[in-house]
Image (cartoon, rainbow, N blue to C red):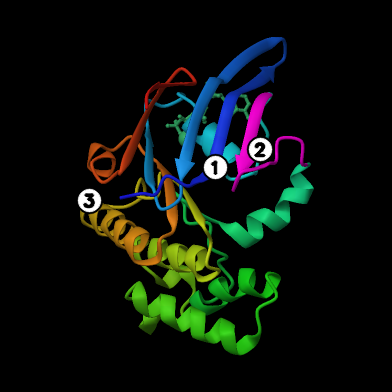
Amino acid sequence: MSSSIPLVQLQNISRKYYLGKTEISALDNLNFQINKNDFVVLAGPSGSGKTTLLNIIGCIDKPSAGKVFFEEKEITDTPLEKLNHLRLQNIGFIFQSFNLIPVLTAFENIELPLLFKGYDEKTIKDLAEKFLQRMGIADKMHQKPANLSGGQRQRLAIARALAGNPSLIIADEPTASLDRKNAIAIIELLRELNDELGVTIVLASHDQMIIDHAKTKLFMQDGKVVNV
Ligand SMILES: Nc1ncnc2c1ncn2[C@@H]1O[C@H](COP(=O)(O)OP(=O)(O)OP(=O)(O)O)[C@@H](O)[C@H]1O
Ligand SMILES: [Mg+2]
């Protein structure tokens, strides 16, 4: 069960892109709320606006119109640079292509954002070990991403996202680069972590198996949520 305490609220959100003189309406007047501890899957065809919406929820993009609230505080007019702090403290990202830093070891990939957050060395070591262990890749601690399998790389990306104790995890097609077995393992792991840590997860996927793991399903089409 998710709570009914709002984490992110979106009111009348639109996002337009301009390609020359052509206007593309990527999001068209969306309204919804993501509650704490929810596990939301955004489903819908390619081009329906899932990534655009995740970018707004993750405070890496701004809507062209509408209001955004994070923990009931309005952030609509807060400049993106000022939202860096909020993002660093509260939000973890998981991507289809993992976005790990190739020259750093697994441990160092987790360490880097924690250094930015100002954690001390001992705390970082404890957190990195704890999450590498939890993800089943403790033995890969000193390996670089190139020496890990796809599933192990995504586990490392999840460990990195979680180690900073975010209230929200945003995952854009996190299983799309994985084979079936690893995709199932990763989605089950994310669901377990959602229960275990209480972290809110918002994920975009076209995959019915992933959609079936949602607590809340949002189907998007042409920049609109067609059911809530
Ligand atoms: N930077 C951009 N400039 C112009 N148009 C864009 C840009 N980013 C996205 N779009 C357009 O906005 C619409 C929504 O794109 P978005 O990437 O959000 O879709 P999506 O649902 O994530 O698709 P996919 O499943 O393929 O990842 C599409 O029509 C896309 O072409
Ligand atoms: Mg996308």
Residue situated in front as seen by the camera: 171 or 29: 29
Residue 46 lies, with reference to residue 186, above or below; the image says above
Q: Which residue appears at 57% of the width and 82% of the height?
A: 124
Left or right: 83 as drawn, with respect to 142: right
Q: Quadrant of residue 90?
A: bottom right
Q: Earlier in the sequence, mark 3 or mark 2?
A: 2
Whether residue 37 can be seen here: yes
Nearer the viewer's eye, disc 3 or disc 2? 2
Residue situated in front as seen by the camera: 8 or 48: 8
The answer for how far apart the CA atoms under marks 3 and 1 are is: 31 Å
Q: Which residue appears at 39% of the width and 70% of the height?
A: 148
Q: Inspect the image, locate mark 2, and give the three-letter code of the amino acid beneath it.
A: Asp
Taking the magenta stretch, the answer to whether it contains residue 67 is yes
Circle 1 — which element?
strand
Residue under numbered circle 3: 180
Q: Inspect the image, locate mark 3, and give the three-letter code of the amino acid beneath it.
A: Arg
Whether residue 137 can be seen here: no
Label 2 Cα crowd, 10 Å radius (few <14 / some 14-19 / many 20+)? some
Q: Identify the residue at the far bottom of this view.
A: 122
Q: Inspect the image, locate mark 1, and give the three-letter code of the amino acid beneath it.
A: Val
Q: Which of the numbered marks, if any, corresponds to residue 45?
A: none
Residue under numbered circle 2: 61
- Residue 150 image position (x, y, % from top left): 36, 60
The span shown in magenta is 65-78
Residue under numbered circle 1: 8
Circles 3 and 1: CB atoms closer than 8 Å: no
Nearer the viewer's eye, disc 3 or disc 1? 1
Q: Earlier in the sequence, mark 3 or mark 1?
A: 1
Q: Which residue appears at 66% of the width and 10% of the height?
A: 22
